[in-house]
Image (cartoon, helix red, strand yellow):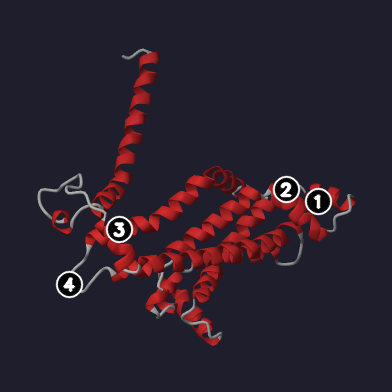
Amino acid sequence: MFSPKVGKYFRKIVHILALLLFFVIIMMPFYFIIITSFKVEKSILGLPIVYLPSPFTFANYAGAWRESNFGRYFWNTLSIAVMTLAIVTVASMMTGYSLSRYKFKGKYTVMILFLITQMVPGVLLIIPLFLIVQSLGLVNTLFSVALGTSATLLAYCSVLMRGFFSQISIQIEQAAWIDGCNKIQAVPYVVMPLILPGLVATGAYAFVNAWNSFLLPLILLTDPNKFTLTVGLRSLIGQYTISYGRLSAAGIICLIPAIAMFAYIQRQMVVGLTAGSIKG
C-alpha cells in the first residue's frame, strides 16, 4: 500500500497524464490542419505520413488569399459579424433590461418561449427567413445575412442579458435617480459599466456565430463577390479534386480572428458567462 503522501502524488500524476492525453486528442486535428497548410500538394496525401512540412511553403496562404478571393470573403464576413454584433448587443440589452426590471403578465412564458426557440433546428428557419428577406428586397446583400443571423440569436442573448441585469441591484439605479438621472440616463451611465463583462460575452457569442454562419450566406448570397469565408471554403472543394493545402490555409485564416478575439477578451468572457448563468 502507498502512504497517503505517495498516493496523493500518484493521483495528481494520473490526473495530469489524463489531461495531457485529452489535450493531445483535442489538438491533433488542429495540428494536422496547420502542418497541411504549409505542405506542397504532392506531400499531403503521400505515404508515409509526414508530420512536419518538408518542403515548407507559404504558397497555400498566398493562393487562398489572392487567387481564391479569400481577401474579399474575409472582409465580407467581418462586415456581417460586426453588424450582427451591433444588432444583437443593442436589441438583447434592451430586451434583457425589460425582462429583468419590469413585471408584466406572461413574463416567464415569454422567457420560456425564447428558450424553446433554441431547440428548433436552424435549417427549418431557412425558408421562412428567405421569404421574409425576399419580401424586404434584401436578397444578395450582406445586411440580409446579418439580419437573419441576428434573428436566430436574439432570443437566447436576451435571456442571457436578463441574467446579467438581474445581478445589478435596482437600488443602484434608484440612487442614480435621486442624484438627478432619469431612467434612461441611469442605464448607460450607471448600469452598463457594471455589466460590461456581460456585454462582452454576449457580443462575442453573436460575433462568433455570425463568423461561422454557413447556411444563411449560402442561401441569401448569389454574387460570388459577396460570399463569406465559410461559403468560400466550400468553393475550394471541386467536383473531382480538392486542394487540401489551400483548404487548410483558408481554414486557418478563418480561425485567426476568432482566436485573437477570445485571447483578448478571455477574462471578460469567463466573468460574463458565469454571471449570466446565475438565476436572477
Whole-angstrom CA distance, mark 4 to mark 1, is 64 Å
Q: Quadrant of residue 52?
A: top left
Whole-angstrom CA distance, mark 4 to mark 3, is 22 Å
Q: Nearer the viewer, residue 30 or 35?
A: 35
Residue 43 shown left or right of residue 159 in the figure: left
Q: Which mark is residue 240?
A: 4
Q: Position of residue 85 (x, y in %)?
A: 56, 62
**Callout 3: 10 Å neighbours few (<14), some, many (20+)?**
many
Q: Are marks 2 and 1 in contact (CB under 8 Å)?
A: yes
User: Which residue is the site of mark 3?
Assistant: 61
Element on which disc 3 rests: helix
Residue name at image x 14 percent, y 54 percent: 43
Residue name at image x 51 percent, y 69 percent: 149
Q: How many marks?
A: 4
Q: Nearer the viewer, residue 43 or 206?
A: 43
Residue that extends furthest to the left in the rendered view of this protein: 47
Q: Which mark is residue 173?
A: 1
Q: Amino acid at mark 1?
A: Glu
Residue name at image x 53 percent, y 60 percent: 206
